[in-house]
Structures are given as C-alpha cells and as structure tokens.
Amino acid sequence: MNGDTATLIHRPYGDLVDDILTSVVGGVVNEPIRFDLKVLTYPLAEPAGGVRGITGTTEDDQPRTFVLDIDFTFSAATNVVIWLEDGTLPKDDTTFYVDYFRVESRSPLSDINVGSVTRTLSEAVGREIATVYEQINLAYESAFVDTASGKSLDYVVSILGVVRKSAEFAEGLITFFRATAFDGNITIPVGTRLAGGGVVFTSTQQRTLQRGQVRIDVPVRADTGFAGDAGLVEAGVINEMTQQVGGIERVTNLDPTIRAAADETDDELRDRARAALAALGKATLLALDRVIREGRGTPVEFFDPNSPLANRSDPGTVTVVVDAEPERLPSLTAAVHQTRAAGVLATLVARYVFITPRITATITPGISAAGQVQIAADVVAALQAVVDGLSAGNAADGAAMLAAVKGVDDITDATIVDVVVARSDLSGDTGDGTLIDALLTAVATAPSDGLRAALTAAVEATGSQAPTGARIPDRSLLVGPTGQPATDDEIEAGTFSVSATVDGEQWWIALDMTASDVDCQEAPSA
C-alpha cells in the first residue's frame, strides 16, 4: 500500500521501464522527497547528471508523471529540482519520487537507446511486472461493489441477496406528481418500490424533482418474482407507493410496461445493491437515536410527523436537535442519512455558536502566491485546533486565538480585525411565539363546545414546529473584559471572548472560517 494515497499501488508500464533503465545504468530510482507548498526548490541527495523523471500525487489526489520544463526544471549547477509556479505541483505534504542519473556511475551498462540489448531486456521484464500489477489490481477491485464488474459484481452483491435482473423483467416509466403544498427539491432514490395490478416495481435510477417542477418520469423495472409476462401491465395500473416519498402526492404509469431490451447493467445493479444495503434495519427514531449516540452525540429533541403537536414536523421529514462537538457533526449527519428511511428528509440541528474571525497577517517577504494560500489555510487549522479543545459551555478566548495565529510559520505579526458571531436558530419554522399566539387566540374566540377543533385547526395552520438550522446573528455573545460588548480596540488587542452560554444552556463554539478570511500582507523590506 502507498502511505500517501492509502490505495493499492498502480505502476504503469512506462514508469516501470524507466525505473529499470535508470537502475541498470547506475542511476537513483524513486528518491523520496516531501513536498512543501511554501518551498519550490529541492536539493537531491547525490550529484546528478540529469533528472530522468518525477512522479507523485497532484492536488486532486491523482497520480502524475511530472513533465520537465513544464512542471519543473533541474539546475545542474546547484543540483536542485525547481518547481515552476505555472506548472502542475504535487499535493502539499505528499511525497514525490525522483529518478536521476549519477554524475559518476560504475555500471558497465550505458546504452539505453531504443533497440539496444539493455533496453529490449528491460522492456520485456517491465512488461511482465506491469502485467502482474494489472492482475493484482483487477483482483483487488473485484472485491468491491463500486469497482467490480460482470460476474465478479454478481458474486459481490449476492451477499446482500441481490441477483442481476435479466431481460425477462419488464421495464417502463412511472410519473411522480408533486404535492401542491410542498415546496423544494424532492429526490426519488434508487430502489423506490411501487405497485399496481398485483405487480411490484422498483426504480432503477435516482431522479430529483426540482423546485417548481410539477412532475417527473422515473425508470422502473419489475421486481424479483415478476419476470416475464407477469411484469407487463397496462397504462394507469401502477398507482401505489409502497414506499412513501416525502412531497409526492401520487404516481402513475402513463404508458404500459414493455419487455426490457437487455439485462440489468452493472451500474443499475450497483445502485440496487446500495439501496438494499441502506434499507437494512433503518427508518425508526430509535435507529436514529442509536447511530447518533454511537457517534458520541446526544439527541436532545426529535421532531417528526407523529410527535406531539409542539414537536411535529412536516410529512416526510424528521429533525433532530443534537448536542455534539462541532467536529463530529459531519460524521453524525452522514450516519443519520445512511440510517433514515428512503425518501425521508432528515435534518440535524446542533446547539452551536458560530464564529468567523477576520485576520490580517504580516508574513515573511518573498513567499509565492501558492505559499500565501497555504499560510492562510494553516491559520484556519491553528484556530480550529483552539476551538476543538473547547468543551460545551467553554468560551472562545481571544488571546488564545491571537497567539495561535501568531504561532503559524512565516507569520511575523497578526491582528484580529473582527469576529462575526451567530447562533443556531432552534425556534422552529414559524417560531415558538407564533404557535402560542395562535393557541391563545383559539382559546379566546372558540365556543366552549368547539374548543378542541379550534385548537387543532390553530396548530395545523402554524405548520411544522421543527427548527430549520438557520443562523441568527448575535453580537451580544462577543464580550470584552468587563462583560460588556467588545469594542474594536478590544477585538484587535485580543482581550475579548465569545460566550458559549445561550439562555442558561451550555452550547458549543464552532469555527466557521475559510482561507479567504485571512488577509496575508508581506512585511515591508528593511
């Protein structure tokens, strides 16, 4: 395994031959050098007569053979590799590998031109090694749903009880119609089950009904057990959703189903296998509670359509208020999305106070543009480390934040020019006050024998009470040494703090910052 990419090493034939040829003439093969985005020159370990090639990983985590005079140059006078700013650079903090010829080589072999004995033998050996690499990679990829194909994919998905559907299984289009009261995008996932005429069908591709669209056609195929003529139904027969999708009012097939033209493709089989895996043991609030707690979060409040009135959400949605460290929220959200029922919109809302520091940093002169971007990213990482060390209810200390920024390499001075503060809105779509006002009005105006009906109508009229996860700007949480709102001078001096106590409850400080919030300015020359 390659420690930089954590994937199985793949060596193309050309790279293997180059390595073999460099080695047999006494050169150095794959000298590892760690790349730092702030540095563009790298000395080689031994005197080199020339660089034969450099390989490594690019910013998008793709392997690359870098090109001489386009990505880098070699200075024989100083024996260094020089990366060109306008070329493709290796990914920061990864290793690139250099092949080069020694100035003095004791190898008796020197002719590596095309057609020479040395090159011919090296190419033959390289071909066999490359073939082995391809066979190893093929065996490795055949063990995973995402990369297996053909018969290998059939074996992998059979573990889930999924079998490839042949052309005997009828196919068609189902039209999904939006509910008039629902606004927003609606995703119809792969594997959505529908029925009609005693036949069950499943969707074969994911479709999204965009906001403003009234209807969308989704391809379906007869489910297991309905092969052949059993899957052929007339138009208008398929009108039942055995698996509800939030925001969809009704479904129908405007045309009859027909015999499939071909067997299920690898992509369709993969999607159906993923849907089968996602459906195992899902769809309950207890399951959501379990995965949140397993992720070291604490569910505080659930909102779903079947909850009591004060905790009711719209049909097809569920919202959970959680108490969790900010760095854990992405993994908790992913776990909830994997656990929720298909077609149900799940939202996690956390009790966070979001801070966005705006930094002006004075840096060492002469650093490249890419290096300055890296410094800004390092500032964000340093502040993230400060915030990650805070517990629920712990205030963010301005002095500690300023010290962390000044501790970043190549920063000679820094100032926090402002801090934007906001907190999570937990009041619900319409706010708690709207529901209370509606109930008071119903009690005051309804006849004694119709009070229950009036209260029910008032609650239904206010809609969902689930929080949306929106943010409310709240600069009152940014305080100076005296406990009063911090002044500009106190912010720049770092003598401020951001409180994490909201309405007497202990919330978490969450950093919401990007490299664009850091202004790097070079120190004036002496």
Image (spheres, rainbow, N blue to C red):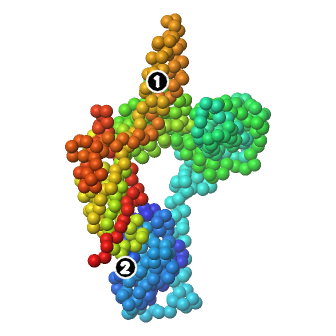
Q: Give how far across and how far down residue 388 sits, in percent.
A: 31, 50
Give the CA distance from mark 1 to mark 2: 67 Å
Q: Give how far across and how far down residue 20 sits, in percent.
A: 47, 82
Q: Which residue is mark 2?
A: 42
Quarter residue 401 falls in: bottom left
Q: Are marks 1 and 2 in contact (CB under 8 Å)?
A: no
In the visual, does 81 lie left or right of 274?
left
Q: Give how far across and how far down residue 484 sits, in percent.
A: 25, 42
Task: Work out which residue is located at the far left of the displayed protein and give it.
Answer: 482
Pick whichever, 406 or 262, lies toward us: 406
Q: Give how far across and how far down residue 396 sits, in percent.
A: 28, 47
Q: Residue at x 53, y 22 (%)?
A: 460
Q: Secondary structure at mark 2?
A: strand
Q: Residue at x 45, y 40 (%)?
A: 470
Task: Work out which residue is located at the far top of the displayed protein and give it.
Answer: 449
Q: Which mark is residue 435?
A: 1
